[in-house]
Image (cartoon, helix red, strand yellow):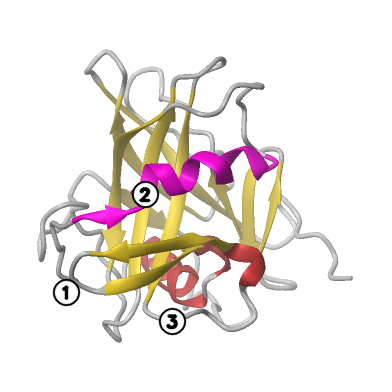
Amino acid sequence: MAVIHHTVLKPSKLELLTPWLPTRPWYRGGAQPPRLSKAGGFRLDDPEGEVGIEFLVVTDDSAPSATYLVPLTYRGAPLDEAEHALVGTMEHGVLGRRWAYDGCHDPVLTAQLLALVEGRAQAQDQNVSDTPDREITRSYAGEGRLAAGATRAADDSEGTVLGAAGGPVLRLHRVLRPAEDGAPRVPEGAMGHVAGGWNLPDGSRARGLFAVLHGAGSGPRLPRQP
């Protein structure tokens, strides 16, 4: 299990995300810089114990306000051929320099996210070591393991698409929307999902879909590789 170190990060995660978020095609903010606050999230464990995996939920209260799902990985050295996915570097009070990546482009995170959808991995509390996060729900109606080795990611105006050629596609909802009655509804025909909760600015709790798994040819399409 990953150990959560309660220590100082310089810059903080929110400081790191403030200039990065407006560069994303799914960002909903206006001309003003984001004003970010932490709204929730969860973690997954790296089986090798080397990579930190966090699904951070942040709220931007600049106009227009929005809440975003930001999967991040934290590494002790740069990830090969992933300069395009680097969010930035931080100095960790215990672990030293950490390279923070958009986790959708990190093979460790994508493999564990697919394992979560299938039920082979357990979501972990964001702030407490060795503590499952029971609020995260998931489902999988497919057969066999989802292939992770050839998974690639592509951003669009709606979020991020993860998948492999000719296989199921996972749509990450980067802009989170609360379910009207607190019960997220999986789209008809979907093969699986991940859902969770986050804090609203008024102090109440919301729930919504974090990701939806679509069968090959039935959901969003990955763009062709150049």
Q: Is residue 54 above or below residue 112?
A: above
Identify the residue at image location x=21%, y=59%.
Answer: 124
Task: Name the image quarter holding the C terminus.
Answer: bottom right
Q: Is residue 115 above or below residue 191?
A: below
- Queried whether the magenta region covers residue 18, the answer comes back as yes
Q: What stretch of residues is rendered in magenta?
A: 8-25
- In the rendering, at what x and y percent does residue 26 appear? 65, 38
Q: Earlier in the sequence, mark 3 or mark 2?
A: 2
**What kind of residue is marked 3?**
Ala
- In the rendering, at what x and y percent does residue 180 appear? 40, 18
- Please, what is the dominant secondary structure of the magenta stretch? helix
Q: Earlier in the sequence, mark 1 or mark 3?
A: 1
Could you tell me if the residues under marks 1 and 3 are in contact, i.e. CB atoms within 8 Å?
A: no
What residue is pinned by disc 2?
13
Camera-side mark, 1 or 3: 3
Q: How far apart are the alpha carbons under marks 1 and 3? A: 20 Å
Q: Quick one: label 2, few (<14), some, or many (20+) residues within 10 Å?
A: some
Element type at mark 1: loop
Residue 54 visible in image: yes
Element type at mark 3: loop
What residue is pinned by disc 3?
77
Q: Nearer the viewer, residue 106 or 17?
A: 17
What residue is pinned by disc 1?
1
**What kind of residue is marked 2?**
Lys
Q: Is residue 220 above or below residue 61?
A: below
